Amino acid sequence: MSEAPERPTIPPARFGERIERARAAAGRAGFDALLVGVGPDLEYLTGYRAMPLERLTMLVVPTAGPATLIAPRLELTPARGCPAARGGFVELAGWEETDDAIALVAELLARALDRSVGSIDRLAVSDRLWAMHVLRLIDRIPSARLESAGPVLGRLRSIKDADEIELLRLAAAAADRVVARIASGRLVGRTEADVAREVRERLLAEGHELAEFSIVGSGPNSASPHHEASGRVIQPGEPIVLDIGGSLGGYGSDITRMVWVTGGDPAKGPDEAFLHLFGVLRTAQARATAAVRPGIACEAIDATARSIIDAEGYGERFMHRTGHGIGLEGHEDPYLVAGNRDPLQPGMAFSVEPGIYLEGRYGARLEDIVVCGPDGPIVLNRAPLDLLIVDGV
Amino acid sequence: MSEAPERPTIPPARFGERIERARAAAGRAGFDALLVGVGPDLEYLTGYRAMPLERLTMLVVPTAGPATLIAPRLELTPARGCPAARGGFVELAGWEETDDAIALVAELLARALDRSVGSIDRLAVSDRLWAMHVLRLIDRIPSARLESAGPVLGRLRSIKDADEIELLRLAAAAADRVVARIASGRLVGRTEADVAREVRERLLAEGHELAEFSIVGSGPNSASPHHEASGRVIQPGEPIVLDIGGSLGGYGSDITRMVWVTGGDPAKGPDEAFLHLFGVLRTAQARATAAVRPGIACEAIDATARSIIDAEGYGERFMHRTGHGIGLEGHEDPYLVAGNRDPLQPGMAFSVEPGIYLEGRYGARLEDIVVCGPDGPIVLNRAPLDLLIVDGV
């Protein structure tokens, strides 16, 4: 394990600012309130990381009146300890085991908005709120139209501040080191699942609190973009997609590199066809990254990568979007996908990860995390993007 | 790490049976279809454990017509590999990055039910489906009334078969060993967070694939039922609530034991008041467990524990339900709580975990996983329920 660099913490006052910005944005969008369940939206607004369980925990932010964090009584102590509560930016309300927590939400809303429950109108709910809670909200507040809080909160969350970018940078650096260690270790003769286990252990040893995914796709499995590491034994003379990540200080890492294992046999190097495919992919990844700048449409980054891959006849073999935002969630706004005309803005952080997949044969993907800087891309991963040709023994 | 005992796998044909039972139950409840998103319901019905991400993966089970597993195209390979797909119990349908996946759900439903989308009536959605998908279903199929699939699926899942009980038993045995190791190791002078880290490592070393929670509540923190392990340093002469768990082969473990650390100083043993409190708790836990038998109402188990604690004047200090079901989810049906008149049935598995919490001072909880057997309780945890008085140095 490397020496841990100093990790920034989000100053408590910032949660107050975030709640106020969210409230203002919800008001401008015509909502009566934001209802935020357990998950990254709640963590963003309050710093509270609760277990996602069946008992309702919810931040209620009426566009008028105080914000209230509702929690089961047996979790009131940790809820009170979150930065937004300690800073006085939210009030606390506990509910007892035999209470109807959703009725409490309705009462709080009616009081804050100074209306009857029956005249509550438009409510924005967090995208990850569980259906069981959504359906009970609909039952309890039948007058309300529930809509996704995604357009309000996703937009706020997509612009990272300096502390968030620093956390993403630290997460990327940790993932870079894991990729380097895995690529320089033994691979031939091991199962994908065993390599994936080592990836997870190394991510944790490098300071990640969660090692969320570890795609190790060898040989023909490299052609399945979201392959689950299997019992397949890695052989000399084949490529491996290594797509790994997790979170560090709450913020995500996500990197993909391509390894080719020869087993030490010079005759088992990559064939011409793979080298051509990889060259096309590398150019597409580089050009898409270079196109990042404030004001360019998200879909234009996707189109940049796709046009290069299309021109070489692989268009059909690149069947996913070019990238996704990253922050408190592994996938979040902005999405670099055809149809998304939203412009990139300084502070947005996202993956740039084209891929080419020849089913039954092999595939390849390259991925960096990139921040939109004031003048162009800031690439957080530093691991070389070359095809890593290794003995693997 | 102990020798790993043989772990049962669920035979593929069972997923076909589960889908048919779910379909029949949904039909009896008057639903047109079950819509099951990523999570334990999907895993129960198909064996497919997908990452919970923003791209829709959904099992569509119309009460007439074939069941279809909808997945993003880039995840079709792992989706095709799940037991229900390999067994031919579900058809597969992929969607492209620029498709509207919810529109695909609507089309599938209309085709299977042989009606227009506009005349789809009642749909049951899985409890953990994300709000973003629920709200798009409401938009796309405005004629439908969406209801929780919980009463249908929760009931099916609550009755465990022999393989599931064996997995719960293995998970419990692993957690028992971790508790024994933690209680016999050094505790005094360590932070709660450091002990929690060791708990997680040991759960993984004992074969858990997930170490989901590790409550280490020392001294006054023992009075916060869902305390998050903190930087507090454990001192001689105080109690520790150790409430740990995760999952093994998909099935949950969850055990709570009480440790008292003396630091080797005979003067730092538990005081009379704590011993009294613990004695009451231990009796309540034992009586509630002994009351388990087919036909008894869930709330009667809760009442058994509560009456003993009430009688000693601690009623107000036991502010949570007595237990929750456990299986593919850490908390699931049946809930042992006032108001739940559902009768226990053979094969139901749940925690029995009363607690007494004196805020600012200390608290205690004891928890076992119990299966309702044909004649009475089958207790899966074997670790002694005594107060574990240890030097801790």
Image: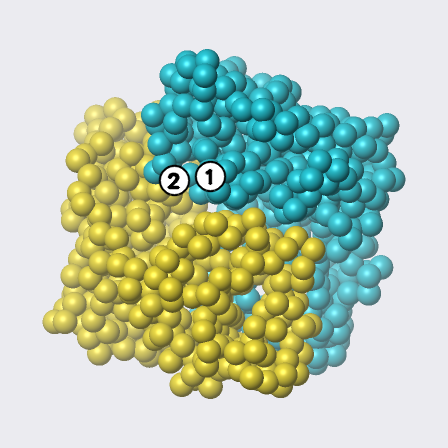
Chain colours: A cyan, B yellow
Above or below residue B94? Residue A216 is: above
Residue B383 in percent (x, y) is at 18, 46
- First in sequence: mark 1 vs mark 2: 1
**Residue on which disc 1 sits:** A221
Q: Is the residue marked by circle 2 packed among few (<14), some (14-19), or many (20+) residues within 10 Å?
A: some
* Mark 2 lies on residue: A230
In the rendered picture of this protein, how many numbered marks are placed on residues?
A: 2
Q: Residue B127 placed where, x, y %?
A: 49, 66
Residue shown at the point (35%, 32%) measured from the top left: A233
Q: Are marks 1 and 2 in contact (CB under 8 Å)?
A: yes
**Vertical relation: B162 (above or below) B197:** below
Helix, strand or loop at label 2? It is loop
Which amino acid lies under the numbered mark 2 shown in the image of this protein? Ser
Q: Is residue B288 left or right of residue B219?
A: left
Q: Name the residue: 65% across, 76% down.
A: B141
Q: Which quadrant of the structure image shows residue B138? A: bottom right
In the image, taking residue B189 as reference, residue B232 lies left or right, namely: right
Tell me the quarter of the image containing the C terminus of chain A.
top left
B190, B154: nearer the viewer? B154
Q: Residue at x 32, y 78 (%)?
A: B342
Residue drawn at x 28%, y 40% as measured from the top left: B207
The amino acid type found where label 1 is placed reads Asn
